[in-house]
């Protein structure tokens, strides 16, 4: 359960932004979407490998 403390006199839009940020960080939507469609383990591993290659290339380009 997500709890967003709202200070007295705080704008409702600001509180909604806080809620949305916390909701995104929990990863509920991401998990829900991943559960809707089955993905083979080989495809998952391939995605992880491609992400690792991409991150490594970014880090090398940075140096």
Image: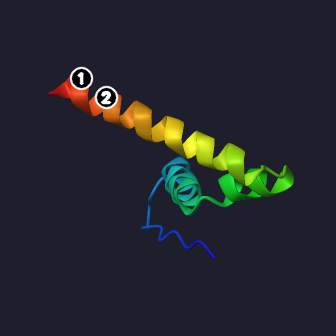
| Tag shown at residue 17 | none
Nearer to me, 30 or 16? 30
Percent position of residue 8, x then y: 43, 68
Where does the image place residue 7, in percent across and percent down from the top left? 42, 67
Q: Position of residue 3 (x, y in %)?
A: 55, 73
- 2 vs 11, left or right, is right
CA distance for labels 2 and 1: 5 Å
Residue at left offset 43%, top offset 41%: 52
Residue ID at (44%, 61%): 9
Considering every residue shown, the one lying at the far bottom of the view is 1
SS class, disc 2 = helix
Q: Quadrant of the N terminus?
A: bottom right
Q: Position of residue 48 (x, y in %)?
A: 54, 45
Residue under label 1: 61
Q: Furthest residue to the left?
A: 63
Q: As rendered, which of 59 and 15 lies closer to the eye? A: 59
- Mark 1: which secondary structure? helix
Pointer 1 local density, CA inside 10 Å: few below 14, some 14–19, many at least 20: few
Which of the pair 53/36 is nearer the observer? 53
Give the labeled residue for mark 2.
58
Judge whether 24 appears above or below 60 on screen. below
**Crowding near pointer 2: few (<14 within 10 Å), some, many (20+)?**
few
Determine which quarter of the picture holds residue 2.
Answer: bottom right
Q: Is the residue under label 1 in contact with that under label 2 (CB below 8 Å)?
A: yes
Say above or below: 56 vs 15: above
């Amino acid at each position: 359960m997500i709890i967003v403390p709202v200070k007295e006199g705080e704008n409702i839009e600001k509180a909604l932004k806080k809620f949305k940020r916390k909701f995104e960080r929990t990863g509920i939507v991401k998990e829900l979407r991943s559960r809707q469609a089955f993905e083979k383990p080989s495809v998952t591993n391939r995605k992880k490998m491609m992400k690792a290659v991409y991150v490594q290339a970014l880090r090398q380009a940075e140096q």
